[in-house]
Amino acid sequence: MDVKETKSRFLTANDVANTLDISMSKAYQIIRDLNKELNKDGYYTVSGKISRRYFESKVMM
């Protein structure tokens, strides 16, 4: 049976830290900043998580 790895729609601070090779505290800071931007645009956010799509659109990878 094939098991497909599904990507979560949200990233955690651990995901952000690993992706950008930064500390956990810096990852939380980035998530807070991005969530503030989303809140300003009228979106609801979850503390400590960021939309994968939004993160990837804002971070040059």
Image (spheres, rainbow, N blue to C red):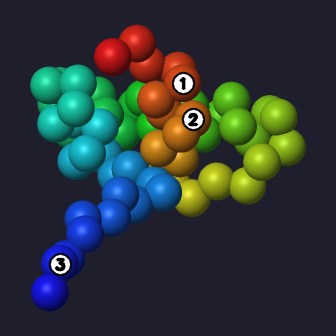
Q: Nearer the viewer, residue 33 or 12?
A: 12
Compared with 15, 1 (above or below) is below
| Amino acid residing under circle 3 | Asp
The residue singled out by tag 2 in the image is: 54
Q: Residue at x 82, y 34 (%)?
A: 41
Asked if labels 1 and 3 touch by Cβ distance under 8 angstroms, the answer is no
Q: Position of residue 50 (x, y in %)?
A: 49, 46
Residue tagged by mark 1? 57
C-alpha separation, residue under disc 2 versus residue under disc 1: 5 Å
Estimate the x, y position of residue 5 in percent, counting from the top left.
24, 65
The extreme top residue here reads 60
Image side of residue 13 versus residue 58, left or right:
left
C-alpha distance separating marks 3 and 2 = 29 Å
Q: Which residue is mark 3?
A: 2
Which residue: 16% across, 36% down? 18
Task: Decide if residue 35 is on the left or right side of residue 55.
Answer: right
Relative to residue 48, is residue 35 depicted above or below? above
As drawn, the residue found furthest toward the bottom would be 1
